[in-house]
Amino acid sequence: MVIDGKHLTFGGTHSAELDPPGPDFDLGKEWDALLNPSWEVGPASTPYQPDAIIQIKHKPAPAPKSGLAVVQARPDWAWDITGKWILTPHRNDRSFRSSIGVPKDTQLTMSIFLANNPRHTKIRRQYWAIFKFGDGIEGCMRFCMPNDEGSKWTAKEFDEACMLDDDDWVGPSPQGSPKMGYRWRVKNCDTGYQPRWYISEFQHESVEFEMGDDGKLSFTAIMTVGFSPRILHGVKTGELEPRKSNAATVKTAWNSYTDIREP
């Protein structure tokens, strides 16, 4: 649009629908009625052209702010297992810590995340976790719905099983499932290698969550260390800060753990 000899560009945003014009509406007359001769400083404005084309470019709505939109919202009945967890060996079994080579007073912690980003719809929703056994041992877990055939899955089949369907939520039966399967990878933080006591990323383990009468979440997990199944208990202790948009995805985190064993 030229105003006072200057070319001006305007943008518009569709905000609402209008009522259709009445039967007596004449666009040509409406156009002519808008002309004020005193506005003209040069040749007359372009007359009304019914066949003229106006190019309209559709701009997608701005991306939602992080944390405001999800692939699928958690239903009210489902348990929010994401957050900070403290782990304890069954009956305070001190041999668990010695078997993984950490001092007996080493704190065992875990953070559970939910990949639920609408920008990553190809991987759908996925529960995953980072666990730390003191400062020396760190690992990654990926969860799936329980399946008796899970121990036979290939890496690709497990990867696909981690992508949860719409009805797959952790929660009370029969709506949800308190049980989940999982696989894990681990590294020695000093060397970057897999510890010798680690069996395999194909070792399919299980975990069962429980909501106590006091409203606190806990779980009991089986973790195989050095060919021996060990029982770990977990208690949720708090929430996590929202992950930044550029934070590592579940696959990036999972693939960051090497498959090279300690020499």
Image (cartoon, grey):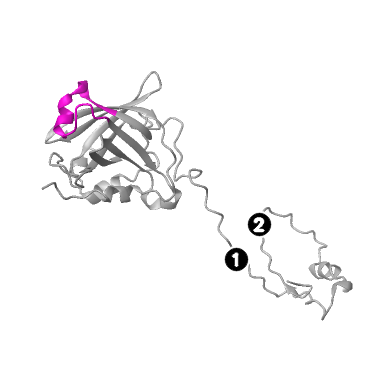
- The amino acid marked with disc number 2 is His
Residue at image position (21%, 50%) is 258
Viewer-nearest residue: 169 or 185: 185
Residue position marked by numbered label 1 in the rendering: 57
**Residue at left 38%, top 18%?**
213
Tell me: residue 46, above or below residue 23: below
**Percent coordinates x, y for residue 252 in the rendering:** 32, 51
The quarter of the displayed image where residue 142 is located: top left
Report if residue 263 is visible in the image: yes
Res. 14 mark? 2
Q: Does residue 103 show up magenta in the picture?
A: yes
142 versus 174 height, above or below:
below
- At 40% from the left and 19% from the top, the residue drawn is 214
Asked where in the image residue 24 lies, by quadrant, the reply is bottom right
Task: Answer with mark 2 or mark 1, whichever residue precedes in sequence.
Answer: 2
Q: Which residues are magenta?
A: 87-107
Count the numbered circles shown.
2
Q: Amino acid at mark 1?
A: Lys
Kindly report the distance in space between the C-alpha atoms of the residues bearing marks 2 and 1: 11 Å
Give percent across and percent down for residue 256. Answer: 27, 50
